[in-house]
Amino acid sequence: MEKAYATIIEQVGEDLTREGLVDTPARAAKAMAYLTRGYEQTLEDVVNGALFPSDNSEMVIVKDIELYSLCEHHMLPFIGKAHVAYIPDGQVVGLSKIARIVDMYARRLQIQENMTKQIAEAIEQVTGAKGVGVVIEAKHMCMMMRGVEKQNSSMKTSMMLGSFRSNSETRSEFLSLIR
């Protein structure tokens, strides 16, 4: 990866021997590895058995989980927040694990639509929940820095599974609570 970054820097017309750029290929490769560390993680590793018995059958919501990802089309960042809810069915997952699941999928080359679905399906798989809802709001640098250059645009995506899809009251409760 370091060699690839050196090639990119040379191809934009820069001099790799210039003081500020001497170590940039190594730094950029290290940064990219960090930004895409989600490929090195599995759902099982992230959850790490943090499931706990619970007789709670009411909605659990974690909102405003910040996320940072890279658009798979331009490899530019998109930055936003995820709101995740589920209705337990005999067990709950450790609170921090929801944020870690969001991070695992965000730290991959992504499109927001797929990431929303992946997070919802992972929460459903891990918890066996009666329903799962995920809403993601993000600003995309590929739309802000290039192309149409629209600075105030944002994208919202949602995925509703189980009772969040089949029951409009459940869906409405979730959407009203994340506003």
Image (tube, rainbow, N blue to C red):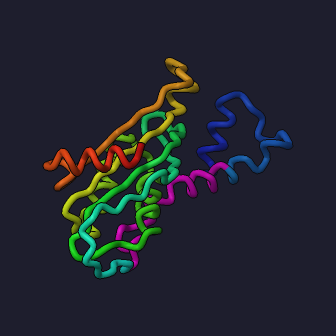
Give the percent coordinates (x, y) of residue 111: 39, 40
Quarter of the image with the C terminus is: top left
Instruction: Name, please, the residue furthest toward the right.
Output: 19
Residue name at image x 29 percent, y 78 percent: 54
Give the left or right position of residue 19, taking residue 120 as reference.
right
Using the image, determine if residue 118 lies above or below residue 70.
below
Main SS of residues in magenta = helix
Residue that sits furthest to the left in the current view = 166
Question: Relative to residue 3, is residue 123 depicted above or below?
Answer: below
Front residue of 73 and 96 = 96
Between 4 and 63, the residue placed more toward the observer is 63
Q: Is residue 156 visible?
A: yes
Residue 17 image point, x, y percent: 81, 41
Percent from the top left, x then y, of residue 166?
Answer: 13, 49
Q: Which residues are magenta?
A: 28-48
Q: Is residue 39 magenta?
A: yes
Residue at position x 34%, y 39% in the image: 157
136 lies left or right of 118: right
Give the camera-side residue of 14 and 178: 178
**Residue visible at 73% across and 47% down?**
24
Give the image location of residue 83, x and y in percent: 40, 51
Which quadrant would residue 92 be assigned to in this image?
A: bottom left
Can residue 122 be seen by looking at this rendering? no
